[in-house]
Amino acid sequence: MGKNKTLEPIPEHFKNLEDASEFWDTHDAGDYEKYLRPIDEQLEFTKELPQAVLLERALSKKLKEVAQHKGVSLETLVNLWLREKLISE
């Protein structure tokens, strides 16, 4: 790494595995060696892939608006609402 290059800070928490992968795909871990530390936690990775569900356009638009208003991702909102519905069944 050049001496004049400033390092982008490592996020304290990544939202998901994809965000972590994207960060480390575009950054050299060797540049951050002094910031890295061992952890005691076991990391678990699932082989399950996310499921895609096609939504009606109007429904998708409204869901995105509600999610943005609540400050959560569309995926989080849909998962929460579906979980609530399943629990009530």
Image (cartoon, grey):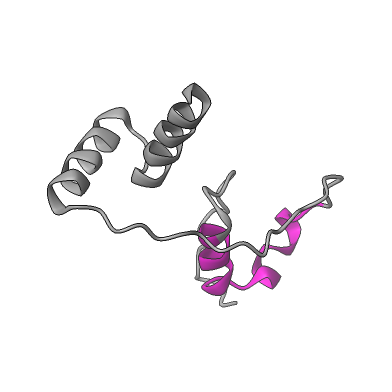
Does the magenta segment cover residue 1? no
- The one nearer the camera, 18 or 47, is 47
Q: Residue at x 51, y 67 (%)?
A: 22
- x and y, in percent, of residue 66 in the image: 24, 33
Position of the N terminus, as image quadrant, is bottom right
- x and y, in percent, of residue 88 in the image: 48, 22
Question: How many badges with numbers are in the image?
Answer: 0
Does the magenta segment cover residue 31? yes
Whether 4 is drawn above or below 60: the answer is: below
Q: Residue at x 26, y 37 (%)?
A: 68
Give the farthest residue toward the left: 58
Q: The magenta stretch spans which residues? A: 18-37
In the image, taking residue 20 as reference, residue 81 lies left or right, namely left
- The one nearer the camera, 82 or 43, is 82
Give the farthest residue toward the bottom: 2
Whether 12 is drawn above or below 21: the answer is: above
- x and y, in percent, of residue 43 in the image: 77, 53
Give the farthest residue toward the front: 89
Q: Quadrant of residue 32?
A: bottom right
Give the farthest residue toward the right: 40
- x and y, in percent, of residue 48 in the image: 62, 62
Q: Residue at x 68, y 59 (%)?
A: 46
Q: Residue at x 50, y 70 (%)?
A: 5
Magenta stretch, overall SS: helix
Q: Quadrant of residue 25?
A: bottom right
